[in-house]
Each structure stands twice: as C-alpha cells, then as structure tokens.
Amino acid sequence: MPELPEVEVNRRGLERLVQDKVIKNVQVFWPKIVADMDVTAWQERLIDQQILSVSRRGKFLIFNLTDGYLISHLRMEGKYFFYLPEEVPLDRDKHSHIIFTFEDNSQLHYHDVRKFGRMNWVEAGVLDSFFDARQLGPEPTEREFDLEVFTQQLHECRQMIKPALLSQRYVAGLGNIYVDEALYLAQIHPMTRANTLTESEICRLHYQIINVLQRAVDAGGSTIRTYRNIIDEAGSYQDQLIVYGKQGELCPRCQTPIEKMKVAQRGTHWCPTCQILKER
C-alpha cells in the first residue's frame, strides 16, 4: 500500500507533469472508484477544470482545481501514469479505470489492480471539513505534529500502539511499513497499550515517526511488490528498512532474529529483545 512517502513522491511527479493542464474529457471504466457522487455529475464537474497545483494530506492526493478539489486515495494498488499525446496507448490497459484527457491531448490514467482506490469531488471552501470528517491527524512534521498533544492523546488511548498509529487519528500518513520501523527505532513493542507508554518513550516515538517518514520521502519511498511512482521510478527506502520484511534476519542492534506476528490483523515485524512487551 502506498504510504505517505510514496504518495508524496507521486504528488511531486504529478505536479510537475499536469500542473496548469485543463481537463477536456474524463472516462470512467469502474464507477465504484467515484465516491459519494453520481458518476455522470462527477465527470461534468471536472470538464474544463484547470489543475492549479497538486498537494497532499496524509495519504490523500489533492488536485487543486479551478472551482474545487479532486481528492484521490490510492489505497492498496492505486497509481497514475502520464502520457504525452504521441505516447497515448492505442489500447487501454484493463487496469486503467479512469482516464483524464487534457486540452493538449496528453492523458493521465488512474491504474488500480484491486480497484480499492477512491476519488471524491470536494467543493471549494469545504476541504478542511472533508478531512475533519475522517478524523485525520496532523502531518508528521516538527511544525504540525505537536509532542504535547500527541502525549496527551496517547495517555487517553487504550488501544495497542500499532493499531493506534495506523488509525490516522494521532498522526497522518503512517502505514504498516513505517509503523514497524518507527516502533523498532523507538524500542517499543507493537502490542504495548498506548496509555502505558512513558513520556520518554512517546518522545522517542514522536521523533522516529518524523525521522523515518522524512528519510523515506528523501529516498523516493519503498518499492514493495508493485509500487513505482508517476515517472516510473522505483523508490529505494526498502534498502534502509531494518525490521519490515526481515523476519529471520539478525537485529543490527542486538543480533536477535527478527520475528513476525499478527497485530490487529496486520503482519508485524519486531525484535523480541529490543522491543519488550510491558505487563498490562
């Protein structure tokens, strides 16, 4: 699943490729990708809209248009492919479910093998409400991700720390890969109850969430299975992963074999020596 670093890298590529383009036509081949709106009405809203910029909130891509916003959530396998007019394929790929054609006849294809991705039209002026309704936490940056607020929230949270972080309520953008990495670096067991964490543990976790995600963005994300970005580049952060996907390999800190288990139905990697589970 694309997490914040992968979405951010795609945002940068999209902005470079489609900023200022005007949408001439929108073809929808899998209507369920269009959320909360009649497909025909959604298509009509997008015609003649200019892409002013492309931004991001958590794992959501935001196409800032003339009169509103197109919000794209890639979910498990969503990705975009851009084609210049002379590169447009004669035959549509069976997994290209939405095709945007611009006035210069270039095209942007939304490709999604599992068809889990969703797109929303959001009117101008209600973007904040869209994300508030989804209880999306702050961006994982030093400026927006306040340590005191995070500490208070975790002290009131009785969930295990891994599903708490995956919920997006406390900080936006984390997924399975980067939660495992941040918890390892902070030396916190993924099944630890959030409200049992000490202030020093929360401080370490806060720092590592920001650190891990920024390093992953700088590396172009992690190439796990089929992920590639909009300009067809594979990320390289997978070469820096310490625990995710490393079961059976030795922990670089203590030489204990990394283990894998299920936590809240998600495959979870951790070091049983460095990440001790507290007594509940």
Image: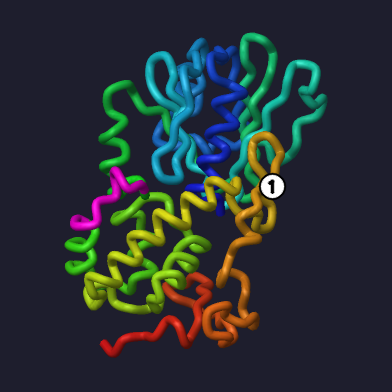
Left or right side of 152 for 253: right
Residue 57 in picture, x, y percent from top left: 39, 39
- The dominant secondary structure in magenta is loop
Residue 256 in picture, x, y percent from top left: 56, 87
* Image quadrant in which you'd find residue 108: top right
Query: Can residue 23 be seen at all in this image of the molecule?
Result: yes
* Image quadrant in which you'd find residue 56: top left
Please tell me which residue is depicted at 60% across the width and 46% down the height of the picture: 220
Q: Which residue is mark 1?
A: 234
Dot 1 crowding, Cα within 10 Å, few <14, some 14–19, many 20+: some
- Residue 138 counted in the magenta span: no
- Residue 144 counted in the magenta span: yes
Q: Is residue 267 placed above or below 166 in the rendered structure? A: below
Q: Is residue 5 placed above or below 96 in the rendered structure? A: below
Residue 274 in picture, x, y percent from top left: 45, 82
Q: Relative to the observer, which residue lies in front, 99 or 184?
A: 184
Please tell me which residue is depicted at 59% across the width and 48% down the height of the picture: 219
Looking at the figure, which quarter contains the N terminus?
Answer: bottom right
Name the amino acid, label 1.
Ala
Left or right side of 10 for 123: left
Query: Can residue 136 be seen at all in this image of the molecule?
Result: no
